[in-house]
Image (cartoon, grey):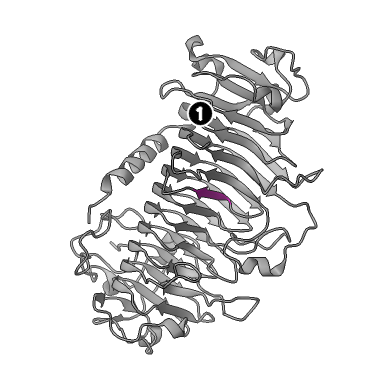
Amino acid sequence: MMKYIRPVLVLIAVAHILSSCTKSETDSIDEEMLPETMGTDYYVHPTMGNDTNSGTSADRAIRTLEKASQIALKPGDRLLLAAGERHIGTLELIGIRGKPDSVITVSAFAPTADKKGEQAHIDAKGEAQGVLIRDCQHIHLRELYITANGYNTENEDLDMRCGVLVTTSAQGHIEDVVLSDMTIRDIFFENPGFVRDPDDVNSANGTGAYGYGIRMISNRATAGIKDVRIEDCHIVNIEHTGIRLTGTAQNISDIVMTENQVQRTGGPGIQMSNTRDAHIVSNEVSYSGSTDDGRKWGRGSGLWTWSASRILIEKNRFLYANGPGDSAGAHIDFNCDNVIMQYNFSAHNAGGFCEILGNTYNCAYRYNISVNDGHRVNGQGGAFQDGKIIWLSGHIGSGSSRKPPMNTYIYNNTIYVRPDIVARFAIEDGTDGLLIANNIFHIVGESGTSENNRMIKKRLDRLFFSNNLFLKAENWPSIFPIEDSQPIFGNVDFETIGGWQIQHYLPRNKALVKGKGIPITRLEGDADGLMLDVIHDIMGEPIGTMPGLGALEVK
């Protein structure tokens, strides 16, 4: 199970090293900490500055983002925007190249003592984006507050609006871009009062023009984006997707997203297409698919991947995803391989907990906690899909022949469903290689199936379905032609049913779960296995020779 381990381990190592630094060690821009050889500082103040100034001191600041965009920044230079002030327009960073040991920084400075600790506000209303980063290397941005709420004068040439757009030209290359300690909010293409066509939410990604929080786009195979880190950002109230990556032939790679909060997006919270080698860790995504503004799309999983490889998604919280279709806590769309969902807390997501679509290989959900996921009912409130606890589908696009998932691993998850939710399961006929083991299915109410016209009709050839704990025998739908070969039944007696913290799902009935798991091995016929093994549970407790049941090892 160790194929592809190196790229993700490198990302994890980088994340751990950076997270061990204090904020003052990594984020400070105090003058006394920078030797004169670091480069030139340029200051921007939207009311006290003047574009005829040199900009090389706070009292000789330039005035506009347009002028700031014309500065030929060199390695070690810093572009400093006045904190607590409103900078109107867009900042364009094109072809800016620092060095690995001498990065270019865009940040904020406090023009007065009372502004210390505030972010610099970029108001990009009517612009294509608040910040454009094109063909740049070794450039770090932080302490910016970006809004772009509609327009004053409509520009028919625009087809989207972004808080930050990271993109490449035909032969361009982006490397070592960091976005940290930023607030990106109220990003809308349309003006307040606009209401979407209600049918738009039924399309795959929406058909109109939308606003996005952070977008990465590299639409030429000859170009590429690599080594981008998004950390400690607050992305809230976005017309469509909070963070969206769109590559070509997986030319977006080596991505880290950590410690971000993504809230009230009209579409998904985070979405990655044609991306490889990414580590998505310790983020909180809530209320994706929001309908609190008529401009929003109104559908979206907390996170989803498409045509992606070697993606590790761990230690995140996915809460309250909404929408008539999809809208799981986090799901794996078609054409993906080696996508691992582990150590996540998923709760109250309309679409469900585990969703894996077609032409996917060696993907896993393990050591996660799911609380009241999958409450959506087909036909109610415009829904065209049921919510599901587990859904394996062969869908690979409209009009294409179906190709169900291959070599799927679902183990050591803790799943709680309250009594008024029907816990539904759907496994498509033709699913090839499936392991379901060591899970806790604490389903208080009824269970059922969905997608019945495509449901498996006979026992799978490569199936390992064993050693799961059910609250009652009826938790697994009897209509399925597969069933647990060695089921366990009983009440684990959670610490706090319906709670919001991982520890609330510690079993108090320790004898029922401790050491009652079985070791997880490769499925028969799976030459590769999963790209990473696990050595501890969701709370960091070591996993013994004989693991327990569910996501938490009890002492």
In the rendered structure, the answer to whether residue 171 lies left or right of residue 550 reads right
Q: At x 53% / y 77%, what residue is drawn? A: 386
Magenta-highlighted residues: 242-246
Number of numbered discs visible in the structure rendering? 1
Q: Is residue 360 within the magenta segment?
A: no
Question: Foreground: 250 or 476?
Answer: 250
Q: Secondary structure at mark 1?
A: strand
Quadrant in the picture for the N terminus: bottom left
Label 1, residues with CA under 10 Å away: few <14, some 14-19, many ≥20: many
Q: Residue furthest top?
A: 36
Q: Which residue is mark 1?
A: 139
Does the magenta segment cover residue 245?
yes
User: What amino acid is at disc 1?
Assistant: Ile
- Tell me which corner region of the image, top left, top right, bottom left or bottom right, holds residue 107: top right
Q: Which quarter of the picture shows residue 132?
A: top right
Can residue 448 be seen at all in this image of the molecule? Answer: no
Q: Would you identify the image quadrant in which residue 129 lies?
A: top right
